[in-house]
Amino acid sequence: MTALAERLAAALVSPAETALIESDQDDLPEHDAMAAAAVLVPITDRPRPGLILTQRTETLRKHAGQVAFPGGRIDPGEDAVTAALREADEEIALPPDAVRVIGAADRYRTGTGFSITPILAIVPPDLALVPSEAEVASVFEVPLDFLLDSANHRAVSTMWQGRERHYYEMMWQDRRIWGATAGMIVNLSRRLRWGI
C-alpha cells in the first residue's frame, strides 16, 4: 500500500475534527428512506495529489452545469463501490481496473432525495479521461490541499423555494464547487485533517 493510500485509509476510520455535514437541509428523511447513490472521489497519486471532478453539461434536466463527482444512482444488485466505479467509467471513461478503492466516506443526504455514499479512491495521475458527451462537459483536477484547506470553504446562504438554504462553496479558478459536492469535500477535510 502506498503512503497516500495508507494515510487516506487511516483517516477514514479516525474521528472527524469537527462536526460533519449530514445534508443539504435540516428536515430531510433518514438515509434509508432516500434513493441510494454513490460517487467516486478519485484522488491522483502524485507528489501533490489532486481530486478529479466533472463539470456537468448545460443540457441536463437536473444540476445542469454544476461541478460534481462522477457518480449516480445505485442500481439493483449493486453496492456503492460497484455503482461508483460503473458511473465513473460511463461518465469519464475511468477504467475500473485503474482504480484503487480505499473505502466509503461519510454519507450525505440531498434535497433532491438521494443518500450519497462517497467512495474514496486513488487513481494514477494523467489518465486519458474522456467525458461522456451527454452528461459531462469537462473533466478537471483540483489540488487536494486546496480543497481540504478550510480557508477555501465559504459558508453561503440563499433563499430557495421560499426557504433559507445554507451550503458551502469553493472557487477554483473559474469553477464554482458548491452544494452536495462541496459538502462532501468539507466532510473529507474534517475527516482527513491534513496539515495544509
Image (spheres, rainbow, N blue to C red):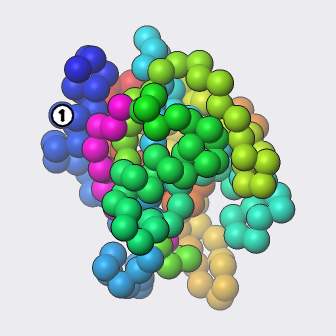
Q: Vertically, is 68 above or below 194?
A: below
Residue 75 spot, x, y in % from top left: 46, 68
- Residue 106 forms part of the magenta stretch: yes
Residue drawn at x 39%, y 24% is 196
Q: Residue furthest right?
A: 59
Residue 93 spot, x, y in % from top left: 62, 38
Q: Vertically, is 25 above or below 17?
A: below
Q: Amino acid at mark 1?
A: Ala
Q: Vertically, is 48 above or below 182?
A: above
Dominant secondary structure of the residues highlighted in magenta in the image: strand
Residue 174 spot, x, y in % from top left: 75, 37
Q: How many numbered tags mark residues here? A: 1
Tell me where the magenta segment starts and ends, as one range: 100-110
| 89 vs 179, nearest the viewer | 89
The quadrant holding residue 23 is bottom left
Q: Residue furthest top?
A: 47
Residue 28 spot, x, y in % from top left: 41, 82
Q: Residues within 10 Å of mark 1 (few under 14, many from 20)?
A: few
Q: Secondary structure at mark 1?
A: helix
Q: Vertically, is 140 above or below 137?
A: above
For disc 1, the marked residue is: 10
The quadrant holding residue 53 is top right
- Residue 194 forms part of the magenta stretch: no
Q: Is residue 132 visible?
A: yes
Residue drawn at x 23%, y 20% is 1
**127 to the left or right of 45:** right
